[in-house]
Image: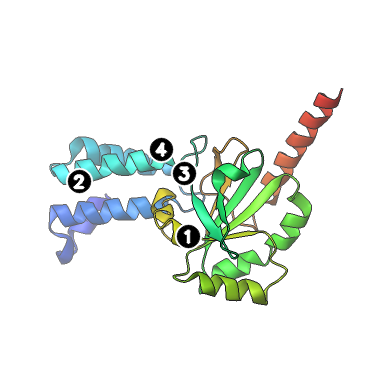
Amino acid sequence: GTMKVMASDPLLKNDTIRELVLLKGLMEIYYVQDFNRESILSILDQVEQRSKIAESKKIASNIKKSFSKMSSGSTAPVFTLKDKDGKLLSLADLKGKYVYLDFWATWCTPCLQEMKLVPALKKKYGKNIIFVSVSIDDDIEKMKAFLAKNPKYDWVFLHYGNDKNIKDNYNVKSVPSYFLIDPEGKFVQSPAQRPGEIEAKFNSITRTKEKKYKVGEK
């Protein structure tokens, strides 16, 4: 199938290059919402078991490990980052509430479009969910200037400069990227739906929390 089609391209005649191109592509599409992840894992299994190239076997194995690290139910990677005032905040500080985490940048138009929907979500669900936006702008001053122009964006904004590994730790290949983390620090959705799609999930979280609270009162 795929490998035969790729082999017909003169640039991809070399087996090693062909497998590397395939592996890189699989890694990127795994994080596209609603993609069939079982199929991708199945192809990675085949490469790991059948490839004649030792390096490809190793890469396929490492990709599978990185996927399991980021799957729902696994622990979200910890981080400590600076906010616009230079104060440090860590993921551990937010335990006890759900965290809706996104990675964005001031130059990213889709990020800014989705961000416009967050104030209404925060108003409705902010009691149970903490909204955290991590800027990957090269300079924290760009984030500060953006926030000065947008005072209604009043949730937690952090800059990744204090922990450049955070992008790798969360396998962020492009922005915007979203993650939903539970009060224990484990992934609920990884990647999570965008602000325009996630309200049904927020609703179910709120209903579950309210039920627990009422039971606890009796």
- First in sequence, mark 1 or 3: give its number: 3
Q: Which residue is mark 1?
A: 160
Q: Which residue is mark 4?
A: 68
Q: Are marks 2 and 3 in contact (CB under 8 Å)?
A: no
Q: Marks 4 and 3, Cα distance to the nearest angstrom?
A: 12 Å
- First in sequence, mark 2 or 3: give its number: 2
- Looking at the picture, which amino acid does disc 1 mark? Tyr
- First in sequence, mark 1 or 2: give its number: 2
- Residue 77 badge: 3
Q: Are marks 4 and 2 in contact (CB under 8 Å)?
A: no
| Left or right: where 117 falls relative to 211 | left
The structure residue drawn at horizontal position 47% and vertical position 60%, both measured from the top left corner, is 160
Tell me the SS state at disc 2.
Answer: helix
The quadrant where residue 102 appears? bottom right
Q: Are marks 4 and 3 in contact (CB under 8 Å)?
A: no
Q: Residues within 10 Å of mark 2 (few under 14, many from 20)?
A: many
Q: Are marks 1 and 2 in contact (CB under 8 Å)?
A: no
The structure residue drawn at horizontal position 21% and vertical position 51%, both measured from the top left corner, is 19
Tell me the SS state at disc 4.
Answer: helix
- Which label lies toward us, 4 or 2? 4
